[in-house]
Image (spheres, rainbow, N blue to C red):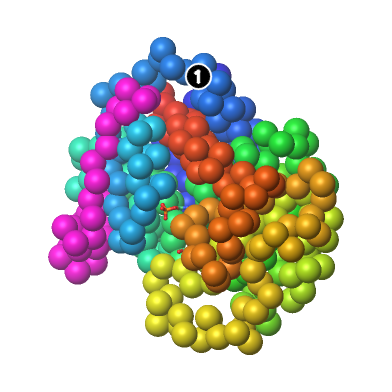
Amino acid sequence: MPPVLSGRDFLSNLDLSAAEYRSLMDTAHAMKRGEFKALKPLEGQTLAMIFEKPSLRTRTTFDVAMFQLGGHSVNLSNAEIGLGVREPVRDIAMNLERWVEGIMARVFLHSTLEELARFSHKPVINGLSDFLHPVQLLADFQTIEERFNETRGLKVSYIGDGNNMANSFVEMAVLTGVDLTIATPRGYEPNASVILHAMSRGATVHLTNDPKAAAEGANVLYTDTWVSMGQEQDAAQRRKVQDFAGFQVNPKLLELTSSDAIFLHCLPAHYGEEVVEEATLHVKSKVFDQAENRLHAQKALLYHVMGR
Ligand code: CP
Ligand code: NVA
């Protein structure tokens, strides 16, 4: 399959049409089957990777993905490049575009990604912002498709904080047709304009404050940390029992899900908060397949965005 996103930015899952999303997922499955092994479609190409925040999975999988596709990556920590401090984001974009074929960035402010994209003629990929985590959702839906061939109508429930992961889930409801329930404590709902936009495009999204109701009969149960990177100043409030009590995935909550359900978590897990170890090690858990799929899904993304 020829690349379908050549030179395009990927800041949000909704940068994709339904057909482009399908091509990407088909390529991700093909990558996992090893069908691209002999090909080096990104030979001679370089991806710059900017990290304002820590990472295990995103950094490793993008780096390994570039290597396996025949290219290479350069890791730039914020301590070195000082986005907006040592020099303006615009200048960083206008330098990098002269040397590399793509930029992946993990940033605090989503607007930093938009600025990089505005000033770089080379494609910019969102490796997580305070607003969205779209590359994670590609791996998540690859994992969901491995269990359930058809996503349309699947009951997918996300439990916890209405954060970047929750916003990206809402966007994915447009592309996948899942029946999405987001259960958060009051005051921690996902972004209202993301929800309104997704619903105007036909997404099915239910909001609730009841984690048990969300888990009941779910085909996919998902959670993420109560405290995201960059929110450390609110940690004490978020960890207060009254805010997130009950919003924990444990074997009891997993019992409420359908018999063929899978449990997913983007990781890292904060054990004893949103999840317990018995849940990530549970027979329904696919969290380590999901982590593996970051590699396959991002190889597919890099192939489509940077391939010629
Ligand atoms: N899930 C995820 O993005 O992991 P890292 O923060 O380790 O990259
Ligand atoms: N919501 C989490 C996701 C980590 C992959 C965070 O932003 O820290």
Relative to 98, does residue 239 appear above or below in the rendering?
below
Q: Is residue 241 magenta?
A: no
Is any atom of residue 155 visible in this view? Answer: no
Residue 165 versus residue 134 in the image, above or below: below
Q: Residue furthest top?
A: 38
Question: Between 260 and 129, which is closer to the camera in this rendering?
Answer: 260
Q: Could you tell whether 193 is left or right of 33 in the image?
A: right
Looking at the rendered image, the quarter that the N terminus falls into is top right
Q: Is residue 72 left or right of residue 233?
A: left
Q: Quadrant of residue 241?
A: bottom right
**Mark 1: few, some, or many residues within 10 Å (few <14, many ≥20)?**
few
Label 1 near ligand 1 (CB < 8 Å): no
For label 1, the residue is: 34
**Residue at the image point whose x is 75% and y is 33% from the top:** 149
Q: Residue 165: x, y in percent?
A: 56, 60
Q: Amino acid at mark 1?
A: Gly
* Residue 274 percent across, percent down from the top left: 58, 68
Q: Residue at x 27, y 37 (%)?
A: 73
Residue at point 40%, 47% (across, down): 58
Q: Is residue 128 above or below residue 284?
A: below
> Which percent across, then down, holds residue 125?
42, 46
The C terminus sits in image quarter: top left
Q: Nearer the viewer, residue 184 or 217?
A: 217
Vertical arrangement, residue 114 with respect to residue 14, above or below:
below
Residue 107, position as x, y percentages in the image: 36, 61
User: For numbered disc 1, what is the local secondary structure?
Assistant: loop
Position of residue 20 in the picture relative to residue 76 (left or right): right
Q: Which residues are magenta?
A: 67-93
Q: For residue 69: magenta?
A: yes
